[in-house]
């Protein structure tokens, strides 16, 4: 974003970086100095005292060092602290300070003039013998520190290999002001080839520092440390010297950098106005909240032309390098940044740094992260090499804040805005650009605790979130609809969505129960139900049940659910569209689906059934993993006594002529005032019960079990049934005619089977059991004439055999006693089969009713064992992989009947081979 005025109108570059054509040329910058160049036979910049002093800014630390050194070397009576330690990492400025101190005291005339020009009240001694030793680049390979110092000071007495004592040092110097600068001592000291001299070198260093601390010895000793050797640190601290840690002097480094790069500020008033303009922009934006706006305004003036947030950020990142770091590496880089923006902007913000253009510099800080940045940089770049407004700047800001902190720290909203905002810019638009054009498109940017950070791992959540922004709201709602039908309601084909989006559906108008699910919430659903039934001129209106959200907050208007659904659709689209997806994608996609499922599940629910006064709501129990379909059926399932009452009333109102079963059934499915049926069997059972109790006469049946119920079967109320004598019990006769050798009776009949036909029938002993209605033989508990009986008929004395008890009769005919649970096999024929355990569990969950009790389970497992399966049996032969078969049968006979959930848990926990098929049969009591 170009500005009305540019830096060139406010400030001028220093002479050091000003090229011949008055442009900025970082090549002229002396960004690295070495003490050993002082003794080079060839000319070097380090030998030029005036040049070195001209590029030096007298920071507070440097001023203190010069002041202490001058007092010591002038032998002020009240000052005897001549030892000084300068600590800091590579490139922190230690060598530059030592070079400045060397020139001040080695060239006192030039040095005094420099001090006076800067208003520093310090008097230098006129004659000082100096020695600057950069220990890794001495004139020859020394093993003893004392010999090296003696050579550089020209003191022959110290070069014989015997380290001088403190007194010998004092006597040798003989009141001559002496300055000794020792650089990179730790690494030199720690070299293995001089290990035998370690104690001597430590002893001499200690003696030097102790001598510098005496008031009778005009000696000042400087030692620069990287703090890498504990032994050296311990020796240097014994004499309690002045210690200056340059690593913590960030403001001084900034002062030094600005002095090197900016010659003059030509429009101070303009810079002050500019600082206020930026600060006012921050004040007026509620997304940038600073604790002290005046302090920010002052810092912008002080750090001009660099924004203080940008400058301190780069200083922090460079200080974490191990190579070419801190002030030294940053100085040249800032000169290049100044050159790039000098005639482009009025203040250099974080977003103005051309990160891509200088990736080689940032790779020294965090090469892996910069590599991922480059990938995303090209991914966001248009085909013509350009970027959308703010896109490149925002990408760069996130990378800069993430360097050396991959996946842990990044840029927050305020840092993004302050890195891009100028007068006239819209903060909402900037952050919207990040949300829409950067986050999600840049695969390696993650959201971390309110910040956005680059990481070496791809962020699948970002890809899903970005893709979700392209998903239409209707597509998201449609996905919720399919989740409700296919997941919550287990895919039953009689479940429909009320007014679905993107779908034309035809709800059949028939007698089968249909569950209609609403995504919308309302105080009153009567109108919606009326539109669905009479409004569509349906015939079987009482075959519809409405399921709605349990609260007044609808699913289709819930922002959180819609956003989750968008992510689910986005993830499914990416799976279809992309060949390669980042690690962890499936896990996040599955979690999004589960979260959506849980959110939708929590919204339901209420089941509305029809009454003559409108819809009647009932709670839908949906906790845990409840099958919504089974739960809805359980709620809708009619109360038997109420259903009996409605049937009784309807038949009674039909009058003496009664009503045919087909008409009664149709009335129940049409008239919403009646109880809603989940199955026609419920109506049949109610009629059968009323008939047995003598309330209804069903065809020819009265006070007995209904044998058959056809569409034209007439139902009449008891008050219209003529009184008849109580029927005699149906007594089964025993025909004791002669039997065959095999024990089966043969009888000749003259009926429709043909004259003289012989029929083999069942026997009791040597007798034939004859039907009490027609006299033909019984086929078990039934006869071709329609006669049949069950345990209830026997118990109530309606069916008997002379000379046989009821229990004997039940046993003879294999009829289950009804004084306990009614246990029956499931399935009636065959078994429940599955090719894997998840499918088996799914099938069991669908087939078994919530109220069922399981009395026995038989599970047959067959499979081919893999190497992992074999190891569970103690077989470690890899050659047998998938060559061993397994066929096991488990019979579970619990002391107490199991619930459906207990059975599902048992199957889930069953340890079976990875590849196994199942055959399952059950004995259950359905409690019906």
Image (tube, rainbow, N blue to C red):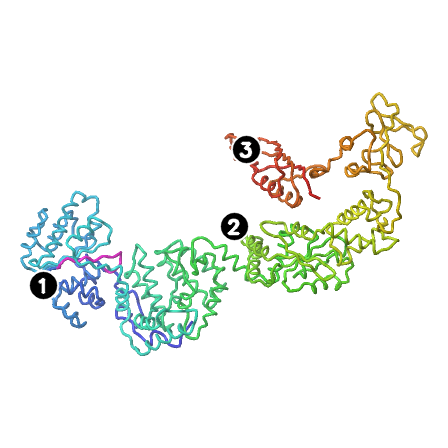
In the picture as drawn, the residue positioned furthest to the top comes out as: 741
Q: Is residue 132 visible?
A: no
Q: Name the one closer to the observer, 208 or 800.
A: 800
Q: Nearer the viewer, mark 1 or mark 2?
A: 1
- Quick one: SS at disc 2? helix
Q: Residue at x 6, y 51 (%)?
A: 157
Main secondary structure of the magenta stretch? loop
Residue at x 83%, y 31% (from the top left corner): 801
Instruction: Rate crowding at label 2 as few (under 14), some (14 to 19) or many (20 or more) other CA atoms within 10 Å.
Output: few
Residue range of the region highlighted in magenta in the rendering? 81-93
Q: Nearer the viewer, residue 579 or 164?
A: 164
Q: Position of residue 764 (x, y in %)?
A: 82, 27
Horizontal side of 375 relative to 863 (left or right) equals: left
> Going 83% across and 56% down the picture, which residue do you hit?
653
Quadrant of the rendered image containing residue 604? bottom right
Q: What is the C-alpha distance between the residues marked 1 and 3? A: 90 Å
The disc, 1 or 3, on the residue closer to the chain's N-terminal end is 1
Picture disc at residue 207: none
Task: Determine the image quadrant of residue 392.
Answer: bottom left
Which residue is disc 1 drawn over?
78
**Percent coordinates x, y for residue 266 in the rendering:** 29, 77
Q: Which residue is mark 2?
A: 587
172 up-or-down from 274: above or below? above
Q: Determine which residue is flagged by label 3.
A: 881
Q: CA distance from mark 1 to mark 2?
A: 73 Å
Q: Residue furthest bottom?
A: 269
Task: Tell me the quadrant of the picture where the C terminus can be found.
Answer: top right
Closer mark to the observer between disc 2 and disc 3: 2
């Amino acid at each position: 974003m170009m500005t009305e005025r540019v830096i060139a109108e406010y400030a001028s570059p220093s002479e050091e970086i000003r090229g011949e054509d008055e442009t900025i040329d970082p090549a002229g910058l002396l960004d690295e100095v070495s003490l050993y160049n002082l003794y080079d036979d060839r000319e070097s910049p380090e030998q030029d005292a005036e040049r070195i002093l001209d590029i030096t800014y007298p920071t507070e630390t440097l001023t203190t060092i010069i002041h202490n050194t001058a007092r010591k070397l002038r032998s002020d009576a009240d000052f005897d602290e001549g030892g000084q330690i300068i600590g800091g990492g590579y490139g922190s400025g230690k060598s530059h300070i030592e070079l400045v101190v060397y020139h001040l005291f080695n060239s006192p005339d030039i040095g005094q003039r420099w001090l006076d020009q800067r208003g520093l009240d310090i008097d230098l001694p006129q004659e000082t013998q100096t020695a600057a030793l950069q220990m890794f680049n001495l004139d020859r390979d020394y093993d003893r520190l004392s010999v090296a110092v003696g050579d550089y000071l020209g003191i022959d007495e110290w070069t014989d290999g015997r380290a001088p004592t403190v007194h010998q040092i004092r006597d040798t110097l003989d009141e001559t002001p002496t300055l000794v600068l020792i650089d990179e001592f730790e690494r030199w000291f720690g070299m293995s080839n001089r290990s035998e001299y370690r104690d001597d070198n430590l002893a001499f260093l200690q003696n030097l520092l102790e001598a510098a601390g005496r008031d009778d010895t005009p000696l000042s000793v400087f030692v620069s440390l990287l703090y890498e050797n504990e032994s050296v640190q311990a020796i240097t601290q014994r004499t309690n010297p002045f210690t200056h840690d340059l690593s913590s002097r960030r403001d001084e480094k900034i002062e030094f950098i600005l002095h090197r790069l900016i010659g003059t500020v030509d429009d101070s008033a303009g810079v002050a106005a500019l600082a206020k303009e930026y600060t006012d922009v921050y004040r007026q934006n509620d997304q940038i909240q600073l604790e002290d706006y005046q302090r920010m305004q002052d810092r912008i003036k002080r750090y001009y032309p660099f924004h203080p947030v940008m400058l301190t950020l780069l200083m922090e990142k460079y200080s974490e390098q191990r190579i070419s770091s801190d002030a030294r590496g940053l100085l040249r880089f800032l000169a290049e940044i100044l050159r790039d923006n000098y005639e482009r902007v009025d203040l250099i913000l974080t977003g103005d740094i051309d990160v891509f253009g200088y990736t080689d510099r940032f790779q020294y800080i965090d090469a892996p992260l910069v590599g991922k940045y480059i990938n995303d940089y090209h991914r966001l770049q248009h085909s013509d090499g350009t970027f959308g407004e703010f896109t490149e700047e925002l990408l760069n800001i996130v990378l800069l804040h993430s360097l050396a902190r991959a996946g842990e720290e990044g840029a927050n909203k305020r840092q993004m805005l302050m890195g891009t905002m100028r007068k006239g810019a819209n903060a909402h638009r900037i952050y919207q650009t990040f949300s829409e054009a950067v986050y999600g498109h840049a695969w390696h940017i993650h959201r971390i605790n309110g910040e956005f950070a680059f990481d070496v791992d791809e962020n699948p959540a970002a890809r899903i979130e970005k893709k979700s922004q392209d998903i239409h709201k209707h597509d998201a709602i449609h996905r919720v609809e399919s989740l409700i039908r296919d997941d919550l309601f287990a895919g039953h084909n009689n479940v429909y969505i009320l007014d679905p989006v993107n779908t034309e559906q035809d709800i059949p108008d028939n007698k089968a129960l249909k569950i209609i699910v609403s995504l919308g919430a309302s105080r009153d659903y009567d109108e919606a139900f009326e539109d669905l039934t009479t409004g569509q001129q349906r015939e079987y209106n009482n075959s519809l049940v409405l399921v709605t959200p349990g609260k007044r907050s609808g699913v289709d208007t819930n922002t959180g659910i819609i956003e989750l659904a968008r992510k689910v659709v986005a993830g499914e689209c990416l799976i279809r569209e992309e060949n390669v997806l980042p690690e962890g994608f499936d896990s996040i996609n599955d979690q999004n689906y589960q979260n959506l499922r849980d959110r939708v599940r929590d919204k339901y629910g209420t089941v509305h059934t029809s009454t003559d006064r409108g819809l009647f709501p009932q709670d839908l129990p949906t906790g845990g993993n409840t099958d919504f379909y089974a739960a809805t059926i359980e709620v809708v399932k009619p109360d038997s006594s109420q259903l009996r009452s409605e049937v009784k009333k309807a038949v009674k109102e039909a009058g003496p002529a009664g009503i045919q079963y087909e008409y009664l059934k149709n009335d129940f499915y049409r008239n919403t005032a009646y109880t809603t049926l989940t199955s026609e069997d419920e109506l049949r059972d109610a009629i059968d019960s009323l008939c047995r109790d003598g309330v209804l006469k069903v065809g020819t049946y009265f006070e007995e079990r209904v044998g058959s119920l056809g569409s034209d079967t007439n139902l009449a109320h008891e008050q219209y049934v003529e009184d008849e004598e109580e029927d005699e019990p149906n007594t089964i006769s025993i025909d004791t005619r002669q039997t065959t050798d095999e024990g089966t009776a043969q009888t000749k009949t003259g009926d429709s089977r043909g004259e003289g036909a012989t029929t083999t029938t069942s026997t009791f002993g040597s007798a034939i059991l004859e039907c009490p209605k027609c006299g033909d033989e019984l086929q078990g508990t039934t006869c071709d004439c329609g006669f049949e009986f069950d345990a209830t008929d026997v118990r109530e004395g309606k069916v008997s055999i002379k000379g046989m008890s009821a229990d004997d009769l039940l046993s003879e005919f294999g009829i289950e006693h009804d004084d306990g649970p009614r246990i029956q096999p499931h399935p009636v024929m065959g078994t429940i089969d599955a090719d894997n355990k998840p499918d088996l569990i799914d099938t069991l969950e669908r087939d078994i009713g919530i109220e069922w009790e399981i009395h026995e389970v038989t599970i047959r497992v067959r499979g081919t064992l893999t190497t992992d399966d074999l190891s569970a049996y103690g077989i470690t032969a890899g050659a047998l992989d998938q060559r061993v078969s397994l066929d096991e049968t488990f019979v579970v006979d619990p002391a107490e009947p199991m619930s459906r959930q207990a059975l599902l848990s048992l199957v889930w926990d069953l340890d079976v081979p990875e590849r196994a098929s199942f055959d399952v049969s059950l004995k259950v009591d359905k409690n019906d």
